[in-house]
Image (spheres, coloured by chain):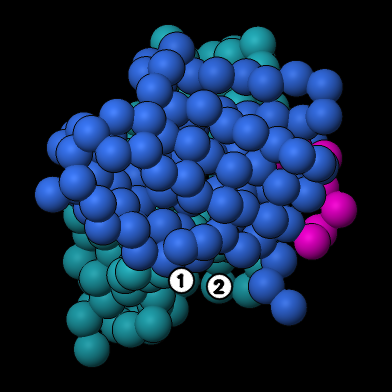
Amino acid sequence: DTAVSQTPKYLVTQMGNDKSIKCEQNLGHDTMYWYKQDSKKFLKIMFSYNNKELIINETVPNRFSPKSPDKAHLNLHINSLELGDSAVYFCASSQASNQPQHFGDGTRLSIL
Amino acid sequence: GENVEQHPSTLSVQEGDSAVIKCTYSDSASNYFPWYKQELGKRPQLIIDIRSNVGEKKDQRIAVTLNKTAKHFSLHITETQPEDSAVYFCAATTGSARQLTFGSGTQLTVLP
């Protein structure tokens, strides 16, 4: 069983569209994250979320919004997609902020 | 914001030689320092981590050292093998939310 699974694996869409990426973890972790990895491989935290608190990185545009229906899921919604949103998006989870994070396989988003 | 600097950005070694990757951090409250390995097209995977109350940790061919006073930590890989070739990321918990801030990555190539 995959510990952190995200779908879809690939997402190709046009500028201006709205899309969602789903993430689920079966590790029983309390905290989930979304990261963006750009073409230069920089890995940047976008959000961290547990059942009490959402932490938003100040550089993330408000077109991006995380939604968590329950502790095991953290989905990422993106409105009005732009060319610069093309990247690989990784979901991750951990028991706490200072515990090992487990990553999903990533979603490669390409904006045409 | 809080920074994590990583050097070198690329590193080539002969098989069997050692490889060392260094990181510095600026947040004096950082207390958790993981290292991740990312193979091409794959997800980042934790290979070793260290906490601020420990100066050194070893796991087979991999070791990490931490100097809290100087705010730097290093990854040491001995007896390198071709399958060690990957991008390696250091990270540190930073900021009031203790999120992980990643270094910019080191592309390690082990030449047979």
Q: Residue furthest bottom?
A: B112
Q: Quadrant of residue B45?
A: bottom right
- Which residue matches tag 1? B78
x, y (%) of residue A45? 48, 32
Amino acid under disc 2? Arg
Helix or strand or loop: what does disc 1 sit on? loop
**Circle 1/circle 2 CB separation < 8 Å:** yes
Q: Tell me: residue B62, above or below residue B80.
A: above
Residue at horizontal 46 percent and vertical 63 percent from the top? A8
x, y (%) of residue A82? 21, 33
Q: Is residue A88 left or right of residue B112?
A: right
Q: Do labels 1 and 2 share a chain?
A: yes
**Residue B20 appearing in the image:** no
Pick whichever, A52 or A81, lies toward us.
A81
The chain drawn cyan is chain what? Answer: B
x, y (%) of residue A37? 34, 45
- Graded by Cα atoms within 10 Å as few (under 14), some (14 to 19) or many (20 or more), the crowding at tag 1 reads some
Q: Is residue B106 left or right of residue B50?
A: left
x, y (%) of residue A33? 60, 39
**Residue A69 appearing in the image:** yes
In whole angstroms, how far apart are the C-alphas of marks 1 and 2? 5 Å
- Which residue matches tag 2? B61
Residue at horizontal 61 percent and vertical 63 percent from the top? A5
The chain drawn blue is chain what? Answer: A
Q: Is residue A27 magenta?
A: yes
Amino acid under disc 1? Thr
What span is colored magenta in the figure?
A26-32
Q: Tell me: residue B91, above or below residue B81.
A: above
Pick whichever, A33 or B106, lies toward us.
A33
